Image: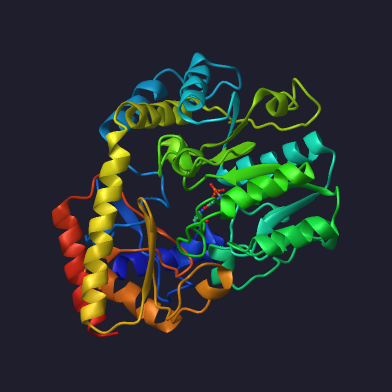
Amino acid sequence: MQYQRSSKLFAEAEKVIPGGVNSPVRAFKGVGGTPIFVKSAKGAYLFDEDGNKLIDYINSWGPMILGHAHEPVIKAITERAKLGTSFGMPTELETKIAELAVSMVPNIDKIRFVNSGTEACMSAIRLARGYTKRDKIIKFAGCYHGHSDSFLIQAGSGASTFGIPNSPGVTQGTAKDTLLAHYNNLDSVRELFENNKNEIAAIIVEPVAGNMGCIPPQKGFLEGLRSLCDDNGALFIFDEVMTGFRLAKGGVQELYAVKADIVCFGKVIGGGLPVGAFAARNEIMNYLAPLGPVYQAGTLSGNPLAMAAGLAMLSELNVHASIFERLDEKTAYLENGIRKVLTQNGVVFTINRVGSMISVHFNETPVVDFETAKGGDNEMFKKFFHGLLNEGVYIAPSAYETWFITDALSYADLDFTIKAIDKVSKTL
Ligand code: KE4
């Protein structure tokens, strides 16, 4: 496959956009080479500027759970656009999608829409601090909650690719209120509560981690965090920007039957348009302006086009909940196929999967936290990535990402992918 036009477009982009991209992880710094410029996408396929057709395992980092340019979503956006694109005034549409989301997700009474997952998590932290009147938060090394200052402390995703433990520009004043624990390690959390008595407002966690590859919570981990929050008067925040409306209709709260106090959403909830949201029970959400003292706002929050796209997406997932089972089956088929060929070809690897989130790690030991995730053979991953790209299969351009499976993938696509992995893994 050739990528001349993408290379040309990248050179032009670099002149006017920092690093030629509007989000660092797209820059291929984790795998080398120049990013692919997309012309269009449909279903499970990307069509790039050089005319290559790629099977997409990123799906815009999660939103395209039903496939690219999904008819009902496109129809909803185009119809709505004819009525005007933004008013800065309430619309019935916002109530409709809020009612639907509240009906799908356990333990929430109200939801506030924002424009990104970052905004959702940033606002959730502010709400937790305002509600508990405490300043400190606990996050986990390798978990990524967007790029607001409080979170860029040993963040995952693109921040890991760049090896930025604390991004420049984040003040010591901010950093001191973010305490770092280790994923799947309850003792590391217990210790923080003991050393910061009555000062911790909340724990924020990716209940299934997806920004150090996919890392499932070990048995008892989420339940243990729940008890630590209850014992110490802290709120438990689930960052479900990736997992929400993907791993189950009700997200991870439903999947593992663990109750969160605040839940953050993004990606799928916007159907591919810029939407984030955070939600909780009334006594917490009523602390938010204009009802309560915690301020949070946004010119384009609840934008009608974005709400129309999100409502079309959630409505389909709500009515056809069998989609989640189908996604799990397809991803299990892919996992088994990859295991078979990598084992046959003598590759040292481990695969993590929860539902339709999956990641391949070239590690000898299980990947259970940020430390073990960092122990993978990154050079091998780069070869794996580019080898697959050459075969027409597009996976995450970083070892610190999960793959997102779309229902638009056919079993023929999955077989094609497994065959490509068989071929590429012979060269690793
Ligand atoms: P956004 O601000 O990028 O919409 O959401 C931030 C965010 C919050 N929480 C979790 C669990 C997330 O995964 C994300 C964003 N995910 C990355 C992919 N790992 C977005 C890709 C990018 O940064 O371009």
| Vertical placement of residue 70 versus 45, above or below | above
Quadrant placement of the N terminus: bottom left
Query: Residue at 51% across / 60% down in the picture?
Result: 211
| Quarter-of-image position of residue 46 | bottom left
Q: In the rendered view, does 422 fall on the left or right side of 8?
A: left
Look at the image and tell me whether residue 66 can be seen: no
Colour style of the rendered protein structure: rainbow
Look at the image and tell me whether residue 187 can be seen: yes
Q: Nearer the viewer, residue 67 or 102?
A: 102
Q: In the rendered view, does 46 fall on the left or right side of 258?
A: left
Point out residue 180 in the picture as x, y percentages from the top left corner.
71, 62
Q: In the rendered view, does 178 fall on the left or right side of 402?
A: right
Q: Nearer the viewer, residue 64 or 284?
A: 284
| Quarter-of-image position of residue 423 | bottom left
- Determine the residue located farthest toward the left in the rendered image: 412
Count up the numbered dots: 0
Query: Residue at 51% across / 72% down in the picture?
Result: 373
Point out residue 19 in the picture as x, y percentages from the top left corner.
53, 66
Point out residue 62 in the picture as x, y percentages from the top left corner.
41, 48
Quadrant placement of the C terminus: bottom left
